[in-house]
Image: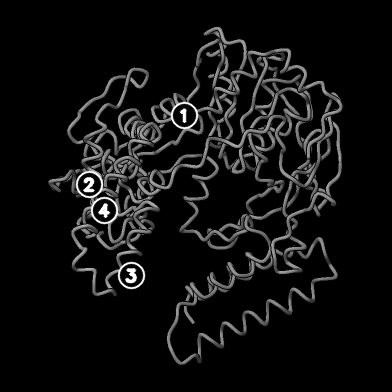
Amino acid sequence: MGIKRNKIYAAMIGLLAAVAPTSAWANKNAEVSRSLEIYSTLLRELDMFYVDSFSVEKTVETGIDAMLNKIDPYTMYIPEREMEDLKFMTTGVYAGVGSVISQRDSLVIIQEVYEDSPSHKYGLKAGDILVSVDGENVVGSTTSDVSKKLRGVAGTPVKVVVKRGEAQREITLNIVRDNITVSSLPIAKNIGNNVGYILLTGFTTGTADLFKTELKKLKQSGINSLIIDLRSNPGGILSEAVDIVGCFVEKGTKVVYTKSKVKEWDETFSTTKDPVDLDIPIVVMVNSESASAAEIVSGALQDLDRAVIMGERTFGKGLVQTSRNLPFGGSLKLTISKYHIPSGRCIQAIDYARTRENGKKFVIPDSLTHEFTTKNGRIVKDGCGVMPDTVYSGDSVPAPIVYHLYSKNIIFDYCTKWADSHPTIPAVADFVFTDWQDFKDFVVKKDFSYKTEKEKLFDALVERAKKDSTYEAAKPQYDALQMALFRCQDEELDKNKSEIIQLISTDLAQRYYYQKGAAEESLKYCKETKTAVGILRDRKAYNAILTNVKSSKK
């Protein structure tokens, strides 16, 4: 059988044992042992007698993934080779070159470079096409394969060959890997009117300490109110969320508690440090992609009537995961409990037990939710994420032409070309993109395939006309009409100029000033942030939201 296969069997047995801890359910010992024996015997029979060779390791992992996918989306097996990814998820730290890569057909492209990373220091740029890594051709490779080649032990070299610019000039870079820390707090800024703004993109190790440091700096700058932006924040470490709430409530305040099947695992999390500011008015911005720890912060501040929550109903992830060590360096990321915020509600929106029974995702209906009350007596509900106090559905859906320019990488490719001929730009606060006609010319040159509704109707008309004998005679008129419709596309571009320029400017700000620059540029256009500022400036309305005991979340 071989040492490797024996290790695989042992890892598989260890995982199954972790999923069903027999010490807690003694009556299931026989069932678990029987299942393990069946699985192990089946695998050995396959390995010895199946007509074709196959990878035992991949087969086991496929079976494990299929089993765990039936539980919930968050319980998963992480083999030893992927443990670095788990470390990055929890700490925001990994060793490599410090860039984001993306796939486009057979090419892998540098999508973003992190500030002060080896990629930054040694000259990689967004838009670079990767040709080879350490002498190995990567054209045709996946982003996963290339990522593994770029990552490595800090201090080790990696030779990267890229093609850059419209001329596709080949550049060789000898990069020394380093430990990369991706900040979960890209920007903290006084945005005027003495309003502070803090953007959080996750909750990794150290996020709360960084948040507290930046909050104190903002207070020194003179802010008297605060916006916390948790939009599209997927969450992270629970204790970091608790410490952030602790910046605004009394020491010893209960923020969240967990309930597990194993009672010994039940925990209560209260604030343990002195607050930074007990009185500063706060608006927390959330949307449908705000989840987990982001919902702990927004939900706890809502339950304690310490902030106005603004935006969309949040995702509704009220489950807590922990890691369990497995044989041979692997790990089980396991859902062990549900969390409840100060009012007592659990915001979990999907019942995975019923989902497993019915085979369809069971979203908890309003009829099965329960009412709870905030500190001031406002009604809130469980089972539906965090419902905002002030609903704001976000900026409007982009026009079709804007969507296609973005999704087909026309804007990204234009910014690559533009940046290649502009070594620097002014500070983000002073930067204004003015090369609109140059962008439109680029769109024409790229043979942009987007068609307006009028053009689609015209194409259908032409196809039908070609079946008629009169088409050739009328062709000049059809061609003239087609040119007129082409001008309609130009008009569509001009009609959506401001939205397109916003995307171009944000992309360029990220290339020159990295994550912070992109966040700062986006603030110039964010209508939701402006609405939040309006709420904070109207203190009477702000206080009324937090004290309206008749308010009910629907």
Q: Are marks 4 and 3 in contact (CB under 8 Å)?
A: no
Q: For residue 104, say whether it is visible.
A: yes
Q: Looking at the picture, how far across and down is residue 25, in whole percent?
A: 82, 64
Q: Look at discs 4 and 1 and give the one toward the viewer.
A: 4
Residue found at x 70% / y 34%: 388
Q: Earlier in the sequence, mark 4 or mark 3?
A: 3
Q: Earlier in the sequence, mark 4 or mark 1?
A: 1
Q: Are marks 4 and 2 in contact (CB under 8 Å)?
A: no
Distance, label 3 to label 2, CA atoms, is: 27 Å
Distance, label 4 to label 3, CA atoms, is: 15 Å
Residue found at x 55% / y 7%: 222
Work out whether residue 279 or residue 156 is closer to the camera in this orientation and state it. Answer: 279
Q: What residue would you read off at disc 4?
A: 481
Q: Viewed as shown, does residue 427 lie left or right of 268?
A: left
Q: Residues within 10 Å of mark 2 (few under 14, many from 20)?
A: few
Q: What residue would you read off at disc 1?
A: 186
| Amino acid residing under circle 1 | Pro
Q: What residue would you read off at disc 3?
A: 464
Q: Residues within 10 Å of mark 3 (few under 14, many from 20)?
A: few
Q: Looking at the picture, how far across and down is residue 261, in whole percent?
A: 81, 54
Q: Are marks 2 and 1 in contact (CB under 8 Å)?
A: no
Mark 4: secondary structure: helix
| Amino acid residing under circle 4 | Leu
Q: Looking at the picture, how far across and down is residue 357, in whole percent?
A: 76, 68
